[in-house]
Image: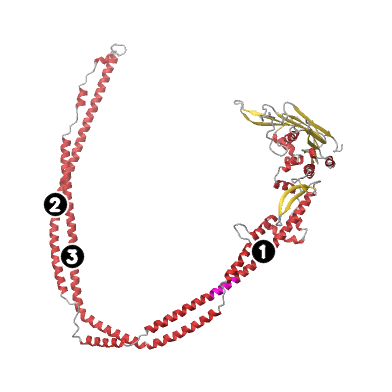
Amino acid sequence: MKRIMLKSLCLENFGNVYGFVRNVVFGNRTTIKGRNESGKSTLGDAYSWALTNKLMNGNAADGIRPHDENGKDFDGTDITVTAVLDIDGEEKRVRKIQSQMYEKKTGKFKGNSNDYMINEIPKKEKGYLEFWESYVPSKIFRICSSAVAFFEMNKEERRKTLFDMIPDYSNDDVIATDEKFLPIKNMLKNGTIEELIKRAKFILKGDKNHKGLEEQLKDIEPRIDEASKGICDVAEYELAVNELKEQIAELDRQEQALNDSIAAYDKASRDILDLKFEQSEIVRKVNEGLVQQKRVLNDEIADLQIKKRDAENALRMAEMDLKHAEMGIQRHEADLKKAQEDWKRWSETEFDETELKSIQSEEFDESSLICPTCGQNLPEEAAQKVRDDFEENKNIRIQRQENLKNQHEETKSKRLEMITEAGNKAAVDLKKAQNAKADAEKKIAEIKGRIADLIIKITAKQQELSKLPDSVDLSDNAEYQTITAESTKQEEALKQMNNGEEQRREISSKRNAAVFEIVWYQQLIKQSHDAQDRVAELQQEQKNLSQRIADTQKELDLLKAFQKAKCDMLTEKINSLFMFTKWQLFKPQVNGDYQEVCEPTYCGTAYGRRLNDGAKALIDLDICYTFQKMNDIRVPIWIDNSERMTSKTLHMLDGIDTQIIFMKAEECDLSVEVRKGSNND
């Protein structure tokens, strides 16, 4: 077992300690008294900061630098905390110094730096923290030192910290307590107890987006009632169907008798049709020659009309050629005239030599040889250079003008050549257009004569065709007249016979009405049978849902019973580790579920519910000491607000074999009382 005891603590410029050094000596039982804001908690925070880099409650060490009454920090001073510890009988002096860092050039604050020492030997931060971690992890150290660190955790963290104290505990331990829990073992393969309970509830109750089994079962009954409305007594319908089928059979017999009676009518009708066919055949043969003659004339008229259309198309093409030729003549005459005008204009164009002659007439100015600065004539060599420069410049300008003149003459020559070529082409094209016009006029006259000749021929053929009769006169044809008379006779006889059409329509109408009624009754019968099937289906579904609900409810009851047993066992195991504290880790709900909580209690009263301050102090100390025992260490326990503890409460701490530091609020300056032994010493 590792044992750490705080022997002394020295603070410089930490919290409300400024301008002086506070040195405190500690014993096995130490009471630090003083009014509020006198520095009691500052000692605990300094102790925790020096050993773990955090305050006693586990928060970051912000705001530890001393400050004035307006909250402005006193800069430029080092914060120093020195702790003398007895670690397993060996004295260790640890020191932590925090300095402010500033930019050398700008003087701007850039952060704090910490220096560490163990027995006056400097240490890096990593090595310093590893030194303490080798004795006790910082998180465990804070919980073992002050219950504040434990209560600063959220509920889930506190529960996990407590459950870590019984690592060997498992669901199998709960299952072993009662054989009714044996099915739980296989169920746990699909999730935790909480997940399985949640799943079972979801199956039963569903949620806002999914219906559970109970709601599904509730929905079944109205669906059965609705489906039952379609069930009726079908015996009446089946009897009506049979009667209608007998009516149809009787109508079929009547229709068959009617068919036999109209066979003679049908035969007479066929005989008349045969006679009509013979008449048509005689007419066809007699008119065959006349039809052929008309066909020949029509073919000849059609050929002539085709030739006339071809000639008319040729006339339109010739007229288009004439129009194009006339347009071409106008265009080529305009091009020829433009070429003549352009040739005349360009042939009269001459280069303007005014600038050239002006340059050629320029003479050298001898006055330019006098220096404008001193008024003296330039040296001969310089003067000659000026003359040479003048002549050179003059020659360059003359050459430039002559080049422009040559360019003008060259452009003029090319332009005249192009104009001549364009004029010659326009003259040739004009001649071609004039010839095309003459050809088109000649062709138009020839085509018009051909069209007039065709019109005469077509008219003659049409007149010949109109003189032919529509059909041959058969009044002298004995065979045709005989057949016609016989056909007329039989048609008169047929009119006196009954074809049964009226009776046939009446029978068909009755039969269709009977068939329609049968279909209607059969639909009613089918709807009733379908409704019976649907009701049976829904009743089976209702039975299945009821069974599933019963099975799921049974599973849920078993899971809740297991959860309660587990809760009781967990709570019992954890409570057995503490001296005064009983933990409420699971809170029963109205619906039979258990809410996860983490509430320490003393004599049945919860820590957060009107528990007296003395009992709260016992719980605070019990938490620290129990964690020390579980981790096989002993470190100083800091009890804040210890004025809440009575002498009776203090006597209850006699069996605790670790250093305890009480911080007690009294209307006095900060003072320290040290007792080496137990609380009774």
Q: Which amino acid does label 2 sit on?
A: Asn
Question: In which image quadrant can residue 362 be found?
Answer: top left
Q: Estimate the x, y position of residue 367 in percent, counting from the top left.
A: 25, 14
Viewer can see residue 671: yes
Q: Quick one: SS at disc 2? A: helix
Q: Crowding near pointer 2: few (<14 within 10 Å), some, many (20+)?
A: few
Judged by depth in the image, the label closer to the viewer, 3 or 2, is 3
* Element type at mark 1: helix
Q: Mark 3 points at which residue?
A: 307
In which quadrant of the rendered image does the C terminus lie?
top right
Compute the Cα span from label 3 to label 1.
99 Å
Label for residue 435? 2
Q: Give the range drawn in magenta.
A: 525-535
Mark 3 / mark 2, whichever is N-terminal? 3
Q: How far apart are marks 3 and 2 (CA)?
A: 28 Å
The secondary structure that most of the magenta stretch takes on is: helix
Q: In this view, does 591 lie above or below 53?
A: below
Asked if disc 3 and disc 2 are in contact, CB closer than 8 Å, the reply is no
Q: Is residue 222 magenta?
A: no
Q: Disc number at residue 549?
A: 1
